Amino acid sequence: MQPKKKTALALRRMKATHERIAMMTAYDAAFARALDDAGIDALLVGDSVGMAVRGESDTLSVTVEEMAYHCRMVRRAVRYAHVVCDMPFMSYQVSAEEAVRNAGLLVSKGGAESVKLEGGAEYADEIARIVRAGIPVMGHIGLTPQSVNLLGGYGVQGRDKATADKLLSDARALEAAGCYALVLEMVPRELAARVTASVSIPTIGIGAGVNCDGQVLVCYDALGMNPDFTPRFLKRFADLHGQIGQAVRAYTVEVKSGTFPDDAHSFAETPVKLAAPVYSNAIQGK
Ligand code: KIV
């Protein structure tokens, strides 16, 4: 049976049916197509694009226009996954009016199907206003990378009672404000389990243990594009950096030795019918 396009409502319902949500980031059409074809539930066009794609040390320089640009590429390629777009730094912090306007731009220009923003109860008004405008909102608490300068780094959050209690009350406030799901980033797994049990919307963890209702990873990290990034929470499900290296070395050898392109990969004056091209042994890993 053909899978159905996932909506924010469908993701929300997955908590009730005890089906875990698999989400990954994507920033362009090629990756989005591959992840969507593999059956991912949701794609997050994260402001992590600043670090993962542009090589910045934080997410703070990413703009609404850039997010819309990346989101549009992802949306074009996707058939089934739900497409969530991050609201970047300073696109919702100044006023509820600006928050609604910028969320609207991510939908109208970027093709986002929902937006995500970082922060707790202090953003309840902005969230409620965006939802009232007809745009589903995913919350994001725990480590909130846009506040890196306030937090002093990218460490685990909620290890003491005061911050753990705040996280729990923030989760409830975001649900009350109208969020359909919640990212929990870098919190102890026991606290993530308590948060998950205390709200009726799904929690999607990154560095938050197995007791969340779903998981999200940055695609380049999960697929092994970034060999220098080795945080404890990250599991690599592929070694794309290694595989690309192997393929490019094989290509370079064939170019330099003059074995590529051979007759099968070039054109004669008189067309001949050839068998479909095959990938080289190097790419097939033989
Ligand atoms: O921007 C991002 O990639 C994120 C995830 C880490 C949740 O917000």
Image: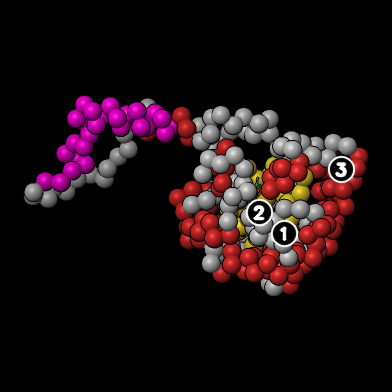
The image's colour scheme reads secondary structure
Q: Distance between the residues labelled 2 and 3?
A: 22 Å
Which is the main secondary structure of the residues drawn in magenta? helix
Which mark identifies residue 93?
1
Q: Does the magenta stretch include residue 223?
A: no
Position of 278 compared to 211: left or right? left
Indicate the amino acid at tag 3: Thr
Indicate the amino acid at tag 2: Phe
The answer to whether one can see residue 119 in this image is: yes
**Disc on the earlier residue, 1 or 3:** 1
For the residue labelled by badge 3, is the local secondary structure a helix, a strand or a loop?
helix
Which mark identifies residue 163?
3
Residue at horizontal 15 percent and vertical 46 percent from the top: 267
- Comparing 208 with 284, the one in front is 208
Q: Nearer the viewer, mark 1 or mark 3?
A: 1
Residue at horizontal 78 percent and vertical 57 percent from the top: 201
Q: Quadrant of the C terminus?
A: top left
- Comparing 30 with 9, the one in front is 30
Q: Magenta stretch?
A: 243-268
**Disc on the earlier residue, 2 or 3:** 2
Position of 194 compared to 113: left or right? right
Residue to which mark 2 is pinned? 89
Q: Which of marks 2 and 3 is in front?
A: 2
- What percent of the width, then of the height, locates residue 85? 61, 57
